[in-house]
């Protein structure tokens, strides 16, 4: 059993649920119904422990004014007509929908920090530790962890809640790259995070 509660001050910790949107979940998550049910339990347990939950979702205005022609990734998104803020594919599934005390951040770049109010929210609440999960590991997870490390946050990555299209990339990131700046933990049951020894 993994127990990292000794490393967590719940009042100074936030859980970042990154890019958990219909289109991405459908494309990357196997057994998505089971996964979402488990994640719903994760979120409930997190709330019970007084940890701030912050959802980060990618989305754009009509005609994509936020997208530069020089940005390869998001030019492709624009050209494919994906991730308009109000599209069904951009929505967070109802089973894991944000609750009253959760925060939701809209982003227009890969990192959860770039061009968003994430750092302001964390600083205002004296949050110094972040626990992250996201789709994709090579995208939002890697970019956010790298930036968070440079901002001196203590970082945990929940391995079982991160997904990528390429299994080898996933393995290298979780076993070799991310551990250089974060503690990567494998939790089949998120309740283990808060277990009492």
Image: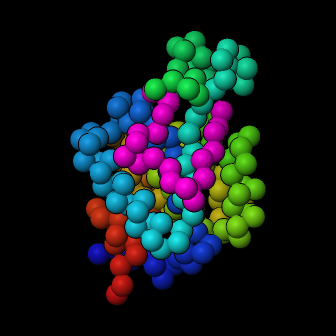
Residue 62, x across and y down, in percent: 65, 17
User: Which residue is most to the top?
Assistant: 79
State the residue in front, 8 or 121.
121
- Asked if residue 92 is among those painted magenta in the image, a careful observer would answer yes
Q: Can residue 155 be seen in this view?
A: no
Residue 3, x across and y down, in percent: 38, 77
Work out whether 176 lies above or below 154. above
Residue at the location (36% across, 54% down)? 39
State the residue in front, 129 or 45.
45
Quarter of the image where one finds residue 189 = bottom left
Q: State left or right for residue 142 relative to residue 34.
A: right
State the residue in front, 20 or 50.
50
- Asked if residue 105 is among those painted magenta in the image, a careful observer would answer yes
Q: In the rendered view of the protein, which quadrant contains the N terminus?
A: bottom left
Residue 100, x across and y down, in percent: 55, 56
Q: State left or right for residue 184 relative to residue 180.
A: left
Residue at the location (65% across, 65% down)? 153
Quarter of the image where one finds residue 51 = bottom right
Work out whether 107 lies above or below 118. above
Residue 160, x across and y down, in percent: 35, 54
Q: Can residue 128 be seen in this view?
A: yes
Quarter of the image where one finds residue 158 = bottom left
Residue at the location (40% across, 75% down)? 194
Q: Give the residues in magenta.
A: 89-108
Work out whether 194 lies above or below 39. below
Q: In the rendered view of the protein, which quadrant contains the C terminus?
A: bottom left
Q: State left or right for residue 182 relative to residue 124.
A: left
User: Which residue is most to the bottom?
Assistant: 197
């Amino acid at each position: 059993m993994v127990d990292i509660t000794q490393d967590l001050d719940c009042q100074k910790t936030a859980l970042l649920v990154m890019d958990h949107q219909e289109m991405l979940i459908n494309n990357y998550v196997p057994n998505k119904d089971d996964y979402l049910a488990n994640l719903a339990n994760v979120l409930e347990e997190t709330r019970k422990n007084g940890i701030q939950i912050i959802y980060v979702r990618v989305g754009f205005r009509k005609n994509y004014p936020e997208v530069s022609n020089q940005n390869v990734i998001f030019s492709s998104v624009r050209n494919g007509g994906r991730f308009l803020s109000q599209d069904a594919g951009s929505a967070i599934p109802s089973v894991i929908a944000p609750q009253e005390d959760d925060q939701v951040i809209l982003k227009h770049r890969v990192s959860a920090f770039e061009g968003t109010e994430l750092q302001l929210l964390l600083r205002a609440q004296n949050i110094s530790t972040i626990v992250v999960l996201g789709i994709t590991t090579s995208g939002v997870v890697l970019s956010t962890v790298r930036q968070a490390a440079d901002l001196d946050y203590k970082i945990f990555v929940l391995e079982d809640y991160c997904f990528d299209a390429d299994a080898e990339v996933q393995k290298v990131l979780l076993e070799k790259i991310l551990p250089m700046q974060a503690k990567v933990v494998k939790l089949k049951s998120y309740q283990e995070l808060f277990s009492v020894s």
